Image (spheres, helix red, strand yellow):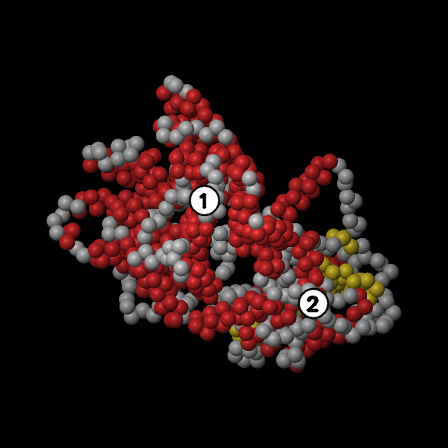
C-alpha cells in the first residue's frame, strides 16, 4: 500500500464521505455566521464547488441552462402574446431537452440507428461520442424546466435575481439526485432569513443520520449480495437470484431514499424545507399507491407536466392507456438510455392499466392488506430485475430462473455468511416496522440525544464505509 | 457570544483541515512528518503496517515493521551508476551508500514520471528492474512499460504566456479538486494511533460476527498473516494460485528478454530482473503455489539475469515479511540488498 496519494482522476463528493461532512459543516456554520444578504452567494459558491468536484468544466453546461431558463422566464412573463409565450417556452424546453438528449441519449439512438442500418447492410456515418454524462443532469434539467413551465402557466413570478435563480437550479443538497423541486416551493426560501433553531437543526441532523444508516448500513450491505448474484446470473441458482432481487428492491430504496434524507436533512439544518421524496413505498397496497410514495418529486413532475396535459384520466379508456404508457416509457427512459429501463417503465404502465381493469372485479377489495402489500411488492420486484440487470438477455434469464427454476432446496449463494444474511433480513424488517409505525423520536423528546448517539454508534459499528456511489447519481 | 466564537473557531479549524487535505504540497509534508516522527501525531499505519490499517484487526495490531532502515553500508571504490525501475519496496528506502561500489543511484517509480537520464560511458551503468510478483505478468505482457526512462537531457522550461496560464489553471485545479481528498482526509482525521481501539472494536465485531474483512485484504496462513486478496484469489492473474500455462510463460520470457535487449541497446552494461515474491507462498508452506517465479527464472530461454531473492526468502521464510504489511521486513530488505551487493561486487 502506498502513502496517501496526492493527485489523480476526478471523483464525486459523495454524501457518505468525510469530504462532504466537512464541506457541510463549513458551509452550514458560515451560513449562520455571515450577514443575511451574502447567504445566497455563499450557497451558490458552495453549490458550484460541490458540482465542480466531478468535472469542473461541466459547470459551463449548467451555467448555459441557467442563463437560458432565466432569460426565458423573464421574457415569458413580460410577453403578453400567448403565441410568443408558447414559442419562448418551446425554445427553453427544446434547449433543456436537447442538452439532455445530447449528453444522455445520443449514443443510445446512434447505437440503435447503427443496428437498424446494419440490417440493410448500411454503415452509420454518425460517430459515437465518448463523453462522461454530467452528474445529475436529468435532475437539474427537469427542475429547470418546471420553472419555465410554471412561469408560463402564471403560477410563479419570473425570478429577477440571476444568483437566486442559479441557486434554485444548483442548491447543493438536491443538485445531483433531487428531490426535483418546484419553484413555488423553493425560490422564496432563498430570500427568507433562517435563524438558528435548535429543534429544526436537530430534526435535520436526525434525518441526515437516518439517511446515512439507510445507505451505509442497509443499502451497501445488501449490495454485496445483489452485485455477486447479478454479475453471474448463469452461475447463480434461482433461489439466490430471487433473494438478490428482493434485496435489490430494498437496496435501491435505501440507497435513493437515504440520499434524499441526507439532502433534505442538510437543507433543513440551514432552514430550507425540501419536498418529501419517499413515503414508505413498500407498504403500498397497489401499484398506483406505490407511485404516490416512490420518488414523489419525479412522479409528480410527470403527473403535472406530461400526464395531465395529455388529458390525464379524464379521457376515454384508449387515450388513458396511451397516456399511462407514454408517461411510464418516458419515465423509464429518464432513468437511462437503455432498453432495460424502457421495459421497466412499460411494465409499470402495464400494472397500472391492469389495476384499473381489475378494479371492476368484485371481492378483490376483501383481500387482506398484508396480502395486497406482498403481492404489490412482488410485482415491483419483477420490474427491478429489468432495472438492475445489465442486459435484457440477462434480465430474462434471471426472470426465468426466479420464476421457473427456483427450488427451496438450492443452497443460498452469497458473499455474506449466515449471520450477516439473517442480520440483513432483520434490518429490512426493522426498516418496514420503523416506517409502518413511524418510530422516529421528535427532537424535543428528552431522549433524542440518547437516540441520536445510539444511531451514530449503530451506523459506525455496522456501516460499510467504502465510498460507494449512490445508484441514482448515474441518472 | 460564546457560541459565535466557538462557531468561528470550528470554521477556521475545518477550513484548515480542508485546505491542507486539498494541497498536494502540504499533504506531502504532513505525510512525511507523521511517518518519520514518533512524537508528531504518528499514524497507526506507521506503527502496525498498511494491511493492519486496512483491516484494524486487533490481533495484527503489533509492531510489524520498522520504517527506519539502517542498511549495512559498503565502502568500495565507486565505479557504478545504478538505475532502478522499482515499486514501493525500494522507493526512498535506500541511499547510494547502501550499494557497493555505486557512485550514483537513480530511481524510477513504476507509477511515477519517467526521469531524464544521461548514461556516463566512463562508468558501469547497471539497471535493476524490480517488480512485485503480483504485477510480474502484467508488466511482462505489456511492452509499453519499457518507456520508463527518458534518455537525454531534460527539456528546458518554456516561459511563454499560454504555458503559464495553463500551469496556473492546472495548479488551481490540483488544489481545489484534489481527487485524493478522501484518502487525505482519512489520513488527517482518522489515521491516529490513539484511535486504534475505536477502529479495532468495529473491525473485530465485523470479523467475529460476519467473518468479513475489507475485500482487498484476506486473512491467510491459518489466520496468522494479512495478505492482499489479489495475491490469493485464484480468479485474478495477480494471484499466486492463478494457473500459468507454458504458452504464457514463453511470452513472458520473450518479453523480458526484449526488455533487457532494449535497455542494453540504450547503453546499460547489464540489466537485472528482481521479482519480489508474493508473501503468501513464502510464509505459508501449505499454499498451492503456481511456481511462477521458479518457472520463469529457471526457464532455459530466459536471457535477462535474475536476482534470485525467491530462494533466499524461502530459506528465511519466517523473517522476511511482517504479518500486517504488504512490504518486507528490514531483514527481508537487507537480504535483498546483500544479494544485490554480491552481484555488484562481482562487477566492480
The residue under the point 31% across, 38% down is A303
Q: Chain of mark 1?
A: A
The residue under the point 57% across, 67% down is B195
Which of the 4 quarters of the picture holds residue B101? bottom right
Residue that protrudes farthest toward the top in the picture? A81
Q: Tell me the residue that label 1 is attached to.
A: A271
Q: Is residue B141 left or right of residue B219?
A: right
**Mark 2 in CB contact with mark 1 (< 8 angstroms):** no
Local crowd at mark 1 within 10 Å, few (<14), some, or many (≥20)? many
Which of the 4 quarters of the picture holds residue A402? bottom left
In the foreground, A267 or A200: A200
- Is B28 situated above or below A165? below
Identify the image quadrant of the C terminus of chain A: top left
Q: Which mark is residue A129?
A: none
Residue that protrudes farthest toward the front in the picture? B1
- Is A78 situated above or below B113? above
Could you tell me which secondary element the residue under label 1 belongs to?
loop
Q: Is residue A132 left or right of residue A369?
A: right
Q: Tell me the residue that label 2 is attached to.
A: B39
Q: Position of residue A229 (x, y in %)?
A: 39, 61
Local crowd at mark 2 within 10 Å, few (<14), some, or many (≥20)? few
In the foreground, A316 or A152: A152
The residue under the point 35% across, 49% down is A278
Could you tell me which secondary element the residue under label 2 belongs to?
loop
Q: Nearer the viewer, mark 2 or mark 1?
A: 1
Residue that protrudes farthest toward the left in the picture? A362
Q: Position of residue A346 (x, y in %)?
A: 30, 44
Q: Chain of mark 2?
A: B
Identify the image quadrant of the N terminus of chain A: bottom right
Q: Position of residue B64 (x, y in %)?
A: 63, 74
Which of the 4 quarters of the picture holds residue A306? top left
Amino acid at each position: 500500500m502506498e502513502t496517501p496519494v496526492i493527485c489523480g482522476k476526478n471523483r464525486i463528493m459523495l454524501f457518505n464521505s468525510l469530504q462532504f461532512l466537512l464541506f457541510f459543516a463549513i458551509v452550514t456554520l458560515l451560513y449562520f455566521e455571515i450577514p443575511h444578504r451574502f447567504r445566497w452567494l455563499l450557497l451558490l459558491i458552495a453549490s458550484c464547488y460541490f458540482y465542480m468536484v466531478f468535472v469542473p468544466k461541466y459547470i459551463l453546461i449548467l451555467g448555459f441552462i441557467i442563463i437560458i431558463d432565466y432569460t426565458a422566464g423573464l421574457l415569458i412573463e413580460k410577453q403578453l402574446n400567448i403565441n410568443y409565450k408558447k414559442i419562448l417556452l418551446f425554445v427553453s424546453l427544446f434547449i433543456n431537452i436537447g442538452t439532455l438528449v445530447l449528453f444522455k441519449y445520443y449514443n443510445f439512438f446512434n447505437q440503435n440507428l447503427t443496428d437498424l442500418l446494419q440490417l440493410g447492410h448500411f454503415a452509420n456515418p454518425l460517430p459515437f461520442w465518448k463523453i462522461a454524462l454530467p452528474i445529475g443532469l436529468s435532475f437539474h434539467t427537469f427542475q429547470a424546466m418546471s420553472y419555465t413551465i410554471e412561469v408560463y402557466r402564471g403560477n410563479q413570478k419570473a425570478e429577477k435575481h440571476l444568483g437566486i435563480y442559479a441557486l434554485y437550479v444548483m442548491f447543493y443538497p438536491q443538485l445531483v439526485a433531487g428531490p426535483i423541486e418546484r419553484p413555488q416551493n423553493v425560490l422564496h426560501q432563498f430570500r427568507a432569513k433562517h435563524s438558528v433553531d435548535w429543534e429544526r437543526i436537530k430534526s435535520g441532523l436526525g434525518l441526515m443520520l437516518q439517511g446515512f444508516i439507510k445507505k451505509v448500513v442497509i443499502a451497501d450491505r445488501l449490495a454485496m449480495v445483489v452485485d455477486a448474484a447479478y454479475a453471474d446470473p448463469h452461475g447463480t441458482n434461482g433461489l439466490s437470484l430471487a433473494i438478490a432481487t428482493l434485496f435489490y428492491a430494498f437496496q435501491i430504496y435505501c440507497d435513493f431514499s437515504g440520499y434524499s434524507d441526507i439532502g433534505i436533512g442538510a437543507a433543513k439544518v440551514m432552514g430550507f424545507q425540501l419536498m418529501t421524496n419517499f413515503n414508505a413505498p413498500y407498504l403500498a397496497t397497489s401499484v398506483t399507491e406505490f407511485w404516490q410514495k416512490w420518488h414523489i418529486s419525479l412522479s409528480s413532475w410527470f403527473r403535472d407536466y406530461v400526464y395531465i396535459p395529455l388529458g390525464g384520466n379524464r379521457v376515454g379508456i384508449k387515450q388513458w392507456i396511451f397516456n399511462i404508457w407514454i408517461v411510464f416509457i418516458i419515465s423509464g427512459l429518464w432513468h437511462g438510455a437503455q432498453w432495460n429501463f424502457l421495459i421497466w417503465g412499460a411494465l409499470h404502465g402495464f400494472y397500472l392499466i391492469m389495476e384499473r381493469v381489475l378494479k371492476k372485479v368484485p371481492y378483490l377489495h376483501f383481500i387482506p392488506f398484508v396480502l395486497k402489500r406482498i403481492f404489490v411488492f412482488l410485482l415491483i420486484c419483477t420490474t427491478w430485475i429489468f432495472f438492475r440487470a445489465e442486459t435484457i438477455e440477462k434480465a430474462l434469464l434471471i426472470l426465468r430462473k426466479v420464476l421457473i427454476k427456483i427450488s427451496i432446496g438450492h443452497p443460498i449463494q452469497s458473499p455474506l455468511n449466515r449471520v450477516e444474511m439473517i442480520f440483513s433480513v432483520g434490518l429490512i424488517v426493522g426498516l418496514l416496522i420503523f416506517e409502518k409505525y413511524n418510530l422516529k423520536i421528535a427532537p424535543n423528546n428528552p431522549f433524542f440525544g440518547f437516540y441520536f448517539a445510539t444511531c451514530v454508534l449503530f451506523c459506525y459499528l455496522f456501516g460499510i464505509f467504502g465510498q460507494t456511489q449512490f445508484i441514482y447519481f448515474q441518472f | 457570544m460564546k457560541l459565535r466564537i466557538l462557531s468561528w473557531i470550528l470554521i477556521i479549524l475545518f477550513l484548515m483541515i480542508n485546505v491542507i487535505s486539498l494541497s498536494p504540497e502540504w499533504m506531502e509534508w504532513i505525510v512525511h512528518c507523521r511517518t518519520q516522527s514518533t512524537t508528531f501525531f504518528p499514524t497507526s499505519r506507521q506503527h502496525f503496517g498498511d494491511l493492519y490499517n486496512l483491516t484494524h484487526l486487533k490481533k495484527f495490531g503489533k509492531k510489524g515493521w520498522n520504517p527506519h532502515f539502517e542498511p549495512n553500508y559498503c565502502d568500495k571504490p565507486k565505479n557504478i551508476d545504478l538505475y532502478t525501475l522499482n515499486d514501493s519496496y525500494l522507493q526512498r528506502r535506500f541511499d547510494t551508500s547502501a550499494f557497493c561500489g555505486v557512485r550514483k543511484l537513480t530511481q524510477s517509480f513504476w507509477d511515477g514520471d519517467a526521469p531524464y537520464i544521461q548514461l556516463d560511458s566512463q562508468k558501469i551503468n547497471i539497471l535493476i528492474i524490480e517488480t512485485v510478483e503480483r504485477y510480474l505478468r502484467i508488466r511482462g505482457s505489456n511492452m509499453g512499460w519499457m518507456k520508463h526512462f527518458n534518455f537525454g537531457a531534460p527539456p528546458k522550461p518554456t516561459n511563454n504566456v499560454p504555458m503559464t496560464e495553463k500551469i496556473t489553471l492546472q495548479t488551481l485545479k490540483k488544489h481545489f479538486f484534489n481527487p485524493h481528498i478522501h484518502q487525505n482526509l482519512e489520513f488527517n482525521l482518522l489515521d491516529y494511533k490513539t484511535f486504534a481501539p475505536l477502529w479495532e472494536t468495529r473491525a473485530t465485531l465485523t470479523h467475529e460476527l460476519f467473518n468479513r474483512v475489507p475485500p482487498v485484504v484476506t486473512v491467510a496462513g491459518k489466520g496468522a498473516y494479512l495478505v492482499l486478496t489479489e495475491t490469493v484469489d485464484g480468479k485474478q492473474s495477480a494471484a499466486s494460485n492463478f494457473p500459468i500455462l507454458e504458452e504464457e510463460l514463453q511470452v513472458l520470457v520473450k518479453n523480458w528478454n526484449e526488455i533487457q535487449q532494449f535497455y542494453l541497446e540504450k547503453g546499460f552494461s547489464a540489466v537485472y530482473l528482481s521479482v519480489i515474491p508474493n508473501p503468501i507462498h513464502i510464509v505459508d508452506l501449505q499454499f498451492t503455489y503456481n511456481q511462477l517465479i521458479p518457472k520463469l527464472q529457471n526457464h532455459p530461454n530466459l536471457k535477462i539475469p535474475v536476482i534470485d531473492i525467491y530462494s533466499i526468502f524461502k530459506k528465511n521464510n519466517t523473517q522476511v515479511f511482517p504479518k500486517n504489511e504488504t512490504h518486507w521486513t528490514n531483514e527481508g530488505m537487507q537480504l535483498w540488498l546483500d544479494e544485490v551487493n554480491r552481484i555488484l561486487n562481482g562487477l566492480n
